[in-house]
Image (cartoon, helix red, strand yellow):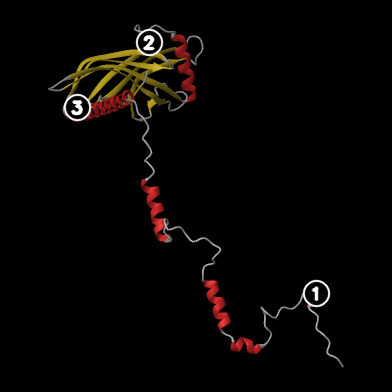
Amino acid sequence: MAKQEEKPALGYPRSEHFYPTDPQYYQTEPQFYQTNAQLHQMPHSAYAQPCGGYPNNASMYQQQSYQYYEYNYPARPLPYVSPDIDRGFSFGRVMLCLMFFLVLFAMIMSMFTYMIFMTMKPTFSLESFVVPMFDLSGDGGPGTTLKANWETKLSVRNMNHRSSVFINHAEMTLVYRYIGLDTSSVDSVEIPKESTVQILDVFSFPNSKNSYNFESVVNEMAKDRVRGQIMFDLKLEVQVMVKSNVFQKAEKMRLFCERITLHFQNGSSNIPTWDGSKRECVPGF
């Protein structure tokens, strides 16, 4: 039987020139692979060789490119500033520094003056409130009458270490429901440094010093007696002078000792008693 001829797959003829099928060929012809490897390593003749003017060293090319970017590009020019604007900024800085030093100097001088000539206003406080007489007849209706006396004791304290306080004139007014019942005054009181002086005042009702509706005041006090307590205020207007060996300073003070509370022991008692709560007079209008 004749040997059938092997047909190539897909209709292409088999090429034995480039792909030998004999195994001995690969064992006896190793120079073929060496020649092919050398061909792959050699540069192809179809590519142009680099020009002699340009070096084929990559590191040298990179160094030259860095030098080109570093030295060949000029620096960016600074923005133009007008000389007038620069002089204006300089003048503003000088004025700002001058104002700062002036304010600092004023603060230092104020602290120095305060430490050397430290002065404080005197303080007033209520020490006692006594009612020697309180004759209220009637229950607040027509024909109700009142005769009363009040005595107060004020404590005036000078806390200055180097200055004395002189009270040129002080006027105290006993106030009931925003109505001044009576006024008392003192003059020429000296308070040495770091000391306390007490001032006594006497108020009476009725009196001819103030003009107000006596009947309305009496009726309200009668109602307060029924409620069991009555409240007064003490207003002070003082002209003081703080004096030392170096200087003297005059000031006017307006103070209020508020909510001075007196209690009636029972509904039929005519003389109220002070609750004893001492309080400091505070500035007011």
For the N terminus, the image quarter is bottom right
Query: Quadrant of residue 57 in the image?
Result: bottom left
- The amino acid pointed to by label 3 is Thr
Left or right of residue 86: residue 230: right
**Circle nearer the viewer, 3 or 2:** 3
Relative placement, left or right, of 136 versus 168 is right
**Residue at which label 3 appears:** 113
Q: Nearer the viewer, residue 170 or 90?
A: 90
Residue 155 rendering spot, x and y as whole percentages: 26, 26
Q: Amino acid at mark 2?
A: Pro
Q: Of the residues shown, which amino acid type is indicated by label 1? A: Gly
Say above or below: 77 vs 191: below
Residue 38, how many percent across, how many down?
Answer: 53, 75
Q: Is residue 65 visible?
A: yes
Q: Report the residue at 43% width, 28% height from top.
A: 265
Task: Using the rendered image of the protein, determine whether residue 144 is visible from the camera's viewpoint.
Answer: no
Dot 3 or dot 2, earlier in sequence: 3
- Residue 12, compared with residue 228, is above or below; it is below
Disc 3 and disc 2: Cα gap in Å? Answer: 50 Å
Instruction: From the image, tell me which residue sits under label 1.
Output: 11
Q: Residue furthest toward the right?
A: 1
Q: Residue at x 57, y 80 (%)?
A: 33
Q: Nearer the viewer, mark 1 or mark 2?
A: 1
Residue at point 54% right, 65% down? 45
**Residue at image mark 2:** 206
Q: Nearer the viewer, residue 218 or 281?
A: 281
Number of the label disc, if any, that sits on residue 78: none
